[in-house]
Amino acid sequence: MSNYSTTSYHLEDYEKNTTYYWKVVTWDNQGESCEGPLWEFTTGYNYNEGQWFGQKDFFYYDGDALQSDEISYSQWTWLQSMVHGPGTLSFYWNVSSEAGYDFLDFSIDGVVQCNISGNGQWEQKHFNISEGVHILLWNYSTDWSSLEGFNCGWIDRVEWINGTPTIPDRPRGPSKLIIGEEGTYETRSTEPHGRDLQYRFDWDADGSHEYSAWTAFYPSGENISMFRSWMQNISCVIKVQARDNYGYTSDWSEGLRVNVTSNHQPNAPTISGNSQGQVKKEYIYQVSSVDLDEQNVSLFIDWGDGTNTSWLSPIPSGSVISLTHAWAEKGTYIVKAKAKDTMNKESNWTTLQVTMPLSFERPHFRFFEWLLERFPNAFLILRQFLAY
């Protein structure tokens, strides 16, 4: 049949001892198409009358269900299908029979997985099917004693979902860490049918294999993150794996190598700026420090006059900050600066001697201040003497 516009199709009459094949082909209004896998199932029996058939009187979903025909003592009737794993099988079933003696059972590759008997309710079953070709079989059978109920079984809403989660993205996160420093690592995977996923990391994939616990479930395609720190020097590879809510797992992702090393103290800062000047005038000083581990650094400057900056906000290693300061009194001051990294390891001090030789607050110096400001390129000897 073709040009079918709904998502279900009802085949009502099944022939005895017959194998049926089908696959779904879809196409859009531009003529593009794709095909699903080839399915097959077979009806069977051990006598001349019974068969499985479609009916609309008793069902769980969408107005119809498969039913086994009524059989006599010590007989059976079965329905068989072949699937190509891996995948997930689910179905609903029910039965009306002599409890404890006549059964509807389900088997995979000849091994019975479960059965029901008596007069029950519709029940859903789920099975994870491994890779390869597998035979699925539903069988209703009776023993030699009495027949009770409707003497049959029903199967409805059989669903087969192919596929496993995609291989997760290579973990994203820092490839260099300091002992005790925490790194955040992100990844994502998708599931072909949109099922939720959980993840686990192998923190030493090329060594002793240190597996994390499985995370909670997240929507397919959503970025997830885990945190990790190491307490020793190590070079290791991180990989990640995904698992859906039916237990199907992906292959391991590509690895990210992470090198964890001991922390080094930052280099002592450099200070540049005026080494002499006049009191109560602000001067600009530039300070920077390089961290060998490329961590951010905080700077602390002591101006030598009882004031300091306290620890400043962290900046990238090697960055330069500009600060201004004015000294209130004449004298010689020792300006000191040090740095610390994000692990609170501090550098040595760096010092700069600053001399404030003269103040222009006295009246007889104000004339010289006016003169030097009026003629900025003159009086070089006087300017040097006054440190102006």
Image: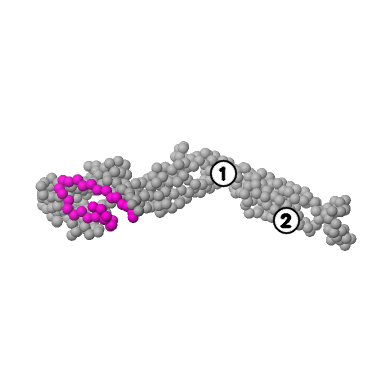
Q: Position of residue 11 (x, y in %)?
A: 20, 53
Q: What residue is rendered at 66% in x and 44% in y? A: 267
The outermost residue toward the bottom is 363
Mark 1: amino acid? Ile
Q: Is residue 344 visible?
A: no
In the picture, which quadrant includes the C terminus? bottom right
Q: Position of residue 381 (x, y in %)?
A: 88, 51
Which disc number belongs to residue 324? 2
In the displayed structure, 281 sits above or below 86; it is below
Q: What residue is rendered at 24% in x and 42% in y? A: 109
Q: Left or right? Give the position of 13 relative to 348.
A: left
Q: Residues within 10 Å of mark 1 (few under 14, many from 20)?
A: many
Which disc number belongs to residue 256? none
Q: Position of residue 128 (x, y in %)?
A: 31, 47
Q: Which residue is mark 1?
A: 178
Q: Left or right? Give the position of 184 relative to 269.
A: left
In the displayed structure, 356 sits above or below 251; it is below
